[in-house]
Image (cartoon, helix red, strand yellow):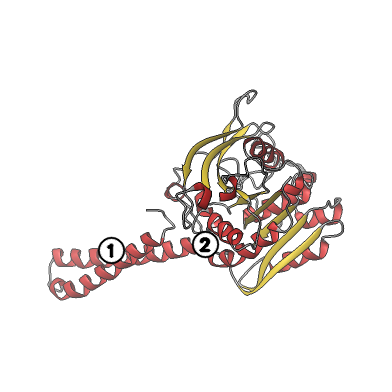
């Protein structure tokens, strides 16, 4: 079972309740003197406590996504990026799996679309990293063989697995539903982590390390446009994400308007967090460190024609003040919109409220070629 699944949480809660009931029933029988009854009492108390803390931990993790997979929790996850070989003559996108979207008629691509698991190789950055590509049903329908589609890159927070963008953040299902309701145009989604390595690279080209910014700003649109019917101009591309992924989305859209027409940050950070997960991102390069502060960039660097959507909450979010500053600093020719909830938090529950209007907003700012 997935670490974030409702089934695992329900199973753990049921086990906790059953063991607690068993403890109450057995306790009088373990009240006798002797080391065996004493050992039984200690064992039951420890077992109940372990299940209670496990239930609390699973519930908090499901809400906040501290760990996306068992490998993340245990520290056994393999690196999410590899140094790519010379890609001359090779496909930059390789399909390694397919699955059906969780929508009515999802077994048929012409009705439900398709989700492909791929490996994406960066021509300039020389890295390869996994992703999921959601293709809407219109992509497969007769008469659309030459139709191109807009695309949105969607990034998780860190740590987090791309699978969390399938559920509990159901991006493909939400996009499918909105398109069916005529609230947004059909769109290809590229779902992935905001890092191209085992460390939290935060869309920074790390000296002597992963060229994360180069990958997301240039390599990814090139690779996806070469493998699918996606336009190559900026007006066909957007990038969005939550938390650290939201920071990456805003950074890439702000500093690379030649590749992305729009960026969405859900509960976004506005500068990279340098800690043990990131390591040294700048190696003493103060200019690059300042450039990676989005509020500094808005004040000191030219602004392109990108559009931005940022979200926060009056209560429950730590990014309220920097979000307001970001909105104030965006100047023509750039554009900015915002969503401010009365109550929210750094959690799936908040982002699930914000994803539908965010996708609608994106759909109105992209155009297929």
Give residue 50's position: percent from left, percent from top: 33, 63
Residue annotated with mark 2? 64
Q: How many marks?
A: 2
Q: Does residue 125 lie above or below 293 as drawn?
A: above
Say whether residue 232 is left or right of residue 144: right
Rendered residue at 52%/39% (across/down)? 79
Give residue 233's position: percent from left, percent from top: 76, 43
Pick the quarter of the image with the C terminus. Answer: top right
CB-based contact (under 8 Å), mark 1 and mark 2: no
Q: Residue furthest front?
A: 143
Q: Is residue 117 at all visible to an observer of this figure?
A: yes
Q: Secondary structure at mark 2?
A: helix
- Mark 1 surroundings: few (<14), some (14-19) or many (≥20) residues within 10 A: some
Q: Does residue 257 lie above or below 339 as drawn?
A: above
Which numbered tag is attached to residue 325? none
> Between 255 and 22, which is closer to the camera in this rendering?
255
- Mark 2 surroundings: few (<14), some (14-19) or many (≥20) residues within 10 A: some
Say whether residue 108 is left or right of residue 142: left
* Res 12 → quadrant: bottom left
Say whether residue 7 is left or right of residue 293: left
Q: CA distance from mark 1 to mark 2?
A: 25 Å
Mark 1 vs mark 2: in front: 2
Q: Is residue 268 at all visible to an observer of this figure?
A: no
Give residue 25's position: percent from left, percent from top: 18, 74
Residue annotated with mark 1? 47
Give residue 272's position: percent from left, percent from top: 68, 52
């Amino acid at each position: 079972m997935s670490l974030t699944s409702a089934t695992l949480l329900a199973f753990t809660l049921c086990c906790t309740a059953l063991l607690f009931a068993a403890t109450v029933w057995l306790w009088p029988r373990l009240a006798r003197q002797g080391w065996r009854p004493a050992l039984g009492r200690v064992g039951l108390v420890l077992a109940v406590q372990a299940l209670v803390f496990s239930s609390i931990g699973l519930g908090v993790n499901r809400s906040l996504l501290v760990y996306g997979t068992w490998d993340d929790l245990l520290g056994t996850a393999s690196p999410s990026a590899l140094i790519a070989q010379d890609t001359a003559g090779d496909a930059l996108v390789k399909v390694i799996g397919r699955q059906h979207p969780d929508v009515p008629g999802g077994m048929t691509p012409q009705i439900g679309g398709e989700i492909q698991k791929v490996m994406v190789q960066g021509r300039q950055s020389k890295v390869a990293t996994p992703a999921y590509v959601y293709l809407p049903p219109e992509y497969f329908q007769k008469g659309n063989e030459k139709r191109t589609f807009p695309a949105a890159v969607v990034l998780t927070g860190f740590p987090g697995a791309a699978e969390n963008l399938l559920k509990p953040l159901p991006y493909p299902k939400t996009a499918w539903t909105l398109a069916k309701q005529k609230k947004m145009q059909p769109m290809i989604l590229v779902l992935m982590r905001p890092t191209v390595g085992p460390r939290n690279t935060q869309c920074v080209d790390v000296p002597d390390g992963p060229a994360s910014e180069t990958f997301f700003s240039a390599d990814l649109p090139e690779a996806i446009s070469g493998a699918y019917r996606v336009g190559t101009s900026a007006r066909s591309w957007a990038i969005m994400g939550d938390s650290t992924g939201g920071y990456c989305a805003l950074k890439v859209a702000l500093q690379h308007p030649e590749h992305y027409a729009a960026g969405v940050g859900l509960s976004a950070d506005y500068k990279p967090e340098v800690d043990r997960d990131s390591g040294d991102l700048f190696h003493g390069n103060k200019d690059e460190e300042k450039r990676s502060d989005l509020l500094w960039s808005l004040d000191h660097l030219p602004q392109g024609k990108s559009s931005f959507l940022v979200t926060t909450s009056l209560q429950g979010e730590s990014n309220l003040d920097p979000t307001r500053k970001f909105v104030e600093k965006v100047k023509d020719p750039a554009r900015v919109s915002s969503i401010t909830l009365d109550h929210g938090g750094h959690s799936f529950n908040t982002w699930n409220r914000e994803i539908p209007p965010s996708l609608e907003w994106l759909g109105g700012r992209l155009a297929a070629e």
